[in-house]
Amino acid sequence: MTNFKGQMSQSIKTNMAGCSLYIKLFIVVLFFVAVVVSRLESTKIKLAGKVTVKEGISLGEESFLTVKLEDTSRMDASAIVVGKHEEILQAGTRIGPDHEGLNYTIVCEKPRKLGSMYSISAVLNVGWKASGEEWIRKGDYFTDTVHDVDLSQETDPVIADVVMVHYPQ
């Protein structure tokens, strides 16, 4: 019987040592997962700023604002939309030099090539929402110049303000 107790005691010690190994392995795996997840989260980029117009306006009806971050580095090809902000603006919203600009935020995947050319564009559809090929009408506002954005900045968020003009000018 004493021999049996000795064998049981040895078996329990061996199982406890194996269990300790599993706990250590679990902690290592947990640490690895935490590192991978934090790196995946850092692949996001946040861009924020204000959209305004040169002359002050007050929207008479519900309108729709679209701000896009685009990769404009490809020659003779359409820009690639990297991220987008869309917002419904209520009637009575005021925009312009004497009023606050419209705040926007874009959170998107961080582009792999930060040396490429990126720009911000904005369109304010007054009283309607763009669809299909129709993206602007007379009386709307849009960016008529290039607003380059340096995504290699070490700031969070990257700040990019935009000024729109009346269409047609």
Image (cartoon, grey):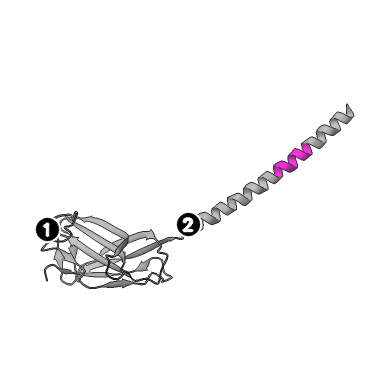
Seen as rendered, the residue at the extreme right is 2
User: x, y percentage for residue 5?
Assistant: 85, 30
Residue type at numbered disc 1: Gly
User: x, y percentage for residue 22?
Assistant: 67, 44
* 14 relative position to 149: left or right: right
The secondary element bearing badge 1 is classed as loop
Q: Quadrant of residue 69?
A: bottom left
Dot 2 or dot 1, earlier in sequence? 2
- Is 152 one of the magenta-colored residues? no
Image: magenta residue range: 12-20
Seen as rendered, the residue at the extreme front is 76
* 127 relative position to 50: left or right: left
Give the residue at mark 1. Answer: 60
**Which residue is at a point 28% across and 62% down the rendered structure image?**
68
**Which residue is at a point 89% across and 29% down the rendered structure image?**
2
Q: Residues within 10 Å of mark 2 (few under 14, many from 20)?
A: few
Residue type at numbered disc 2: Leu
Q: Quadrant of residue 152?
A: bottom left
**Which residue is at a point 34% across and 71% down the rendered structure image?**
117
Q: Are marks 2 and 1 in contact (CB under 8 Å)?
A: no
Q: Which mark is residue 40?
A: 2
Q: Quadrant of the N terminus?
A: top right
User: x, y percentage for residue 140?
Assistant: 14, 63
Judge depth for marks 2 and 1 and give the one in front: 2
- Classify 35 as above or below 113: above
In the depicted view, which residue is nearer to us: 20 or 148? 148
Q: Residues within 10 Å of mark 1 (few under 14, many from 20)?
A: few
**Which residue is at a point 67% across and 48% down the rendered structure image?**
24
The secondary element bearing badge 2 is classed as helix
Q: Tag count in the figure? A: 2
